[in-house]
Amino acid sequence: MSKSSWDFQAGDAITSGRTVVKSLGGGRRYEVYLVWDEKLFALVVAKIVRPDRVDDEDAMRGLRREADALARLAHPVLLRGFDTVVDGPRPHILVEHLEGPTLAALIDRHGRLPLEQLLPLALQLCSALHYLAGERMVHLDVKPDNIIVGLPPRLIDLSVTRTLDEARRISRPIGTASYMSPEQCRADSEPGLIGSPADIWGLGASLHEAIAGTPPFGDRGDAGTAEYPQLERAPTPLPGRVPGPLAEQVRRCLDRDPAQRPSASEFALALEPLVAALPRKLVLGRRTGRVI
C-alpha cells in the first residue's frame, strides 16, 4: 500500500531545481510545501498529489482543473500559477507564495474584523468575483479558509472551479458544507441551477463570519443536526452595530433564491459609500514627511 505522505524534509528535491524549504500542511488529496525554485529564483508553493492518490482519477482531475483555471485566469485578487507537472511520480502545481493569514485564522485570533479592514476586503473580493463571472467561471468554494488577507488579498484554491457550462452539469453537492449555496447543496436532486450567484453566497457567508465572529449557520465544517442547515433555517442575526446597508447586502447574498442575490458589482457599488465614509489614515508625504 502506498504511503499517504511524501514526508519531504528541508533540502529534499521535488523535481530538478525545485527544493523543499518546509511543509505547509495539506488536505486529503494534496500536500503543500514551501519550495525554492531555481528557474524563478524565488520562494513559491508546490501543491502535490499525495503518493497514495497519484493513481486516483479524481485527485488528478482536480489538479488539472486547478492548473487550467490558473492558466486561464489573471486578476490581482486571484492566486497566480507558475508551472504544472502532471506526468511523472510527483504531480504538482506551482503557485505564488503569499504573505498574510487566512481570513479564518484572523477571525480565530482576533474575532470580528473592524469595518476599516472588512469593507476594503469585501470590495477586493467583489472585484475578483465580478471578473470570474465575466470570464464565465465559478469558484464554488469561497470561504474564509480560501481568503488570504494580504496587500492585496487573494482568493485561493481553484481546485473545484468550473466554467458556467460545467457548473450547470454538476450533479452532486460540491464545495465546503458550511459555505455552500442551497443550489450547491441540492445539486443531486435539482441540477442545472449553479452559476455565479453561488459564489455570491460564499462571499456573503464569509463576510457574515467576519462581521459576527461565527459562521452564519453553525461552526465551520459542522452541519449540525441537518446535513445542510442553510436549507432549513435563516442565518444568525448580525450584531446591531453593523451599518444597515452592509447588513442588507450580506442578507441579500444569503437569499436562498439565486435570482435575489446581488451581483458582485452591485454589492461593491452598495459598499462604496461606506468605504468613502471611513476615517482617512495618516499617511506620510513622500517628500516632506508631513502628515497629509
Image (cartoon, helix red, strand yellow):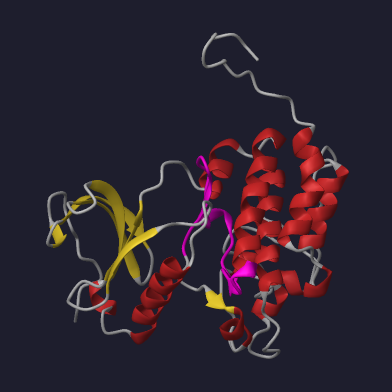
- Is 84 located above or below residue 206 in the figure? below
Query: In terms of depth relative to the viewer, which is nearer, 52 or 125?
Result: 125
Q: Quadrant of residue 281?
A: top right
- Is 154 on the left-hand or right-hand side of 214? left
User: Hey, which quadrant is residue 266 in on the image?
Assistant: bottom right
Residue 160 pos. (x, y %): 50, 73
35 relative to 274, above or below: below
Rendered residue at 75%/30% (across/down): 278
Taking the magenta stretch, the answer to whether it contains residue 138 is yes
Percent position of residue 31, x then y: 31, 63
What range of the chain is rendered magenta?
Answer: 133-157
In the picture as drawn, the residue positioned furthest to the front comes out as 287
Viewer-side residue, 289 vs 67: 289
User: Residue 236 colored magenta?
Assistant: no
Q: Quadrant of the N terminus?
A: bottom left
Residue 223: horizontal and vertical position, in percent? Answer: 63, 68
| Looking at the image, residue 5 lies above or below residue 45 | below
Q: How many marks?
A: 0
Q: Quadrant of the C terminus?
A: top right
* Image x and y of residue 11, in percent: 12, 50
**Left or right: 174, with 7 as reference point:** right
- In this rendered view, identify the residue nearer to me: 70 or 119: 70
Residue at 23% across / 74% down in the picture? Answer: 51
**Would residue 213 be seen by someone viewing this image from the given angle?**
no
Residue at the right extreme of this rendering: 244
Q: Residue at x 72, y 46 (%)?
A: 212
Q: Say if residue 188 shows up in the picture.
A: yes
At 71% from the left edge and 36% from the top edge, which residue is drawn?
115
